[in-house]
Image (cartoon, grey):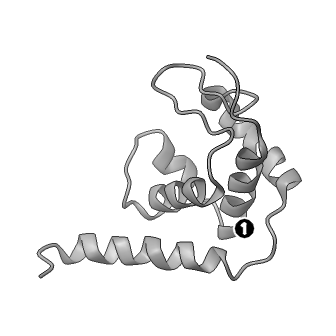
Amino acid sequence: MIHHPRSFAALLVVILSILTFGCTAEADIQAGKVAAVQCQACHGKDGIGLTPQTPNLAGQKELYLSTQLVAYRSGSRKNSIMSPLAKPLSDEDIANLAAYFASLPATGSR
């Protein structure tokens, strides 16, 4: 039994958004690299977080990254920094960013 219809609705939006990624054209890693410039202030030039509180994006699974960005965009996951940054992203932007960061090596240090 669902006690929080809003939570269920938000979860449903996230799930449906994730499922559409499988139906879209191939993600463009180069476009993701261009878009990722705005991410560098916190996540570093190579996708390695600059502080212990900032997660590394390099080498993460593409589906994980896209899921998190969709959740920030929809409001089902909240963060005072990430939520407003993800809000204007299109599905294509999210796919490209996820493909780019997933293509980077996970090695590196803070």
Image side of residue 12 versus residue 2, left or right: right
35 or 103: which is nearer to us?
Answer: 103
Q: How many marks?
A: 1
Residue drawn at the location 88% of the way across and 52% of the way down: 30
The residue that appears at 45% across and 60% down in the rendered structure is: 71
Q: Which quarter shows the N terminus?
A: bottom left
Q: What residue did someone put label 1 on?
A: 92
**SS type, badge 1:** helix
In the rendered image, which quarter is residue 36 located in?
top right
10 left or right of 4 in image: right
Give the image location of residue 17, x and y in percent: 53, 75
> The residue under label 1 is which amino acid type?
Glu
Q: Residues within 10 Å of mark 1 (few under 14, many from 20)?
A: some
**Vertical placement of residue 11 versus 62, above or below:** below
Instruction: Give the residue drawn at x 55%, y 72%.
Output: 18
Residue 46, horizontal then vertical, whole percent: 75, 30
Q: Is residue 66 left or right of residue 108?
A: left
Q: Position of residue 3 (x, y in %)?
A: 11, 75
Q: Relative to 10, is 93 above or below? A: above
> What x and y, as percent, mark residue 12?
38, 78
Image quarter (top left, top right, bottom left or bottom right) of the C terminus: top right
Instruction: Name the one closer to the observer, 21 or 85.
Output: 21
Residue 82 lies, with reference to residue 49, above or below; the image says below
Quarter of image, res 66? bottom right
Which is nearer the eye, 39 or 108?
A: 108
Residue pictured at 38% horizontal, 54% vertical: 77
